Image: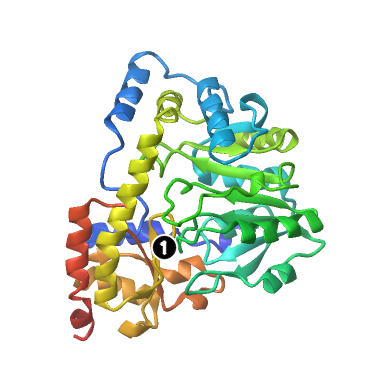
Amino acid sequence: MLAARVQHFTESVIRETTRLAQKHGAINLGQGMPDFDPPQELKDAACRAIQDGFNQYAVTWGIAPLRQAIADKMRVFNGVEWCDADAHVTVCCGATECMMAAMLAIVDPGDEVVIFQPFYENYGPDALLTGATPKWVRLNPPDWSFDPAELRAAFSAKTKAVIINTPNNPTGKVFTREELTVIAGLCQEFNAYAFSDEIYEYINYADRPHVSIASLPGMSDRTVTISGLSKTFSVTGWRLGYCVAPDAITAGIRKAHDFLTVGAPHPLQVAGAAAMRFGESYYAKLKADYYRRREVFLPYLREAGFDFQPPDGAYYVMTDIAGLGGTDDVEFVRRMIETVGVAAVPGSSFYSPKDLGRTKVRFMFAKRDDTLHQAGERLLRLREALAH
């Protein structure tokens, strides 16, 4: 009955974990949504936009004030000096739609797409929906580096694109300029494009700045930079993402976007334009707050018996459960939810084949400090609970 393109998909493991957490009253450290509100100024701006009548369709590819704010930010923060609001920016319904629209605009059936793994769970299905073949390249623990030789071997005459996610979900890896330069060189050598998902760009604990591959020499005409407001402003339910790409690619993205969702919510775009004008103090506090949350939660994980490398960015930590006797990540997470009341995401959902992640579990720490302390105290009882 179903089309072949969806028959091999399963429900999102992340969303399934959320339902299990709700069923058992567990603290949800699985799905990446905060338990705190966005800034009051942003909420007020959204309410004001609704009251002021911004309730009908917006321009399909995004209202002008938001696109202008994005273009300004891309030039200053990301170093993409050529970014023009009218020619290069498309606002979509979340970064997830951005990736799908970009792939539909560029990737044809029979093409190959290089994807680093562990990977955000949408990337593989996105490639398959376009009729492409994913080519997997490992990010190797503990520092989640890649082997340049393995990456080169993944490229071929069929390679249409490579997907980069920095800071990375699920590992928290921040790609270095040197690593991005290697990727850029291969893109140019094999005439491939880069889809760069930078949704966590402001949540960076590394002692080096965020680098966008679009800012590197030779990459301006072959990069789609994807980001959004969800993580930076704690509004994951608003679904405001954006693509920045050269003119010809933008034209294709806008066509795909038009027929996927028509447009993102108008009043939330108005509020988003206000958020994009927050000063540098906002971003400094954002980074400091997430650094504090990381430092609150990670010691509990260590004491509880999880093995991991502290993430350099984003708000996730990928852990190894072998030291706790874990050999089946799905069963481990289920027992953790049922016995101590903490939910995480099974690591196998970030790998292909899934067996590569059977001893991995991802936690997120975009939570209030008291929530993290409560979750941590519960996890300290995990070893004893698993023994029974």
Question: Could you tell me residue 30's position as x and y percent?
Answer: 34, 60
| Relative to 33, residue 66 above or below | above
For label 1, the residue is: 311
Query: Looking at the figure, which quarter contains the C terminus?
Result: bottom left
Question: Could you tell me residue 269's position as x and y percent?
Answer: 45, 27
**Residue under the image location 81 percent in, 58 percent down:** 189
Query: Looking at the figure, which quarter contains the N terminus?
Result: bottom right
| Residue 190 appears in view | no
**Residue under the image location 49 percent in, 74 percent down:** 141
Q: Extreme top residue here?
A: 52
Question: Could you tell me residue 367's position as x and y percent?
Answer: 27, 52
Question: Could you tell me residue 5's position as x and y percent?
Answer: 62, 57
**Residue under the image location 36 percent in, 78 percent down:** 321
Q: Amino acid at mark 1?
A: Pro
| Relative to 223, residue 119 above or below | below
Rendered image quadrant of residue 152:
bottom right
- Give the colour scheme shown: rainbow
In the shown orientation, is residue 111 left or right of residue 61?
A: right
In the shown orientation, is residue 7 left or right of residue 297?
A: right
In the shown orientation, is residue 4 left or right of residue 51?
A: right
**Residue under the image location 69 percent in, 61 percent down:** 182
Residue closer to the observer: 293 or 262: 293
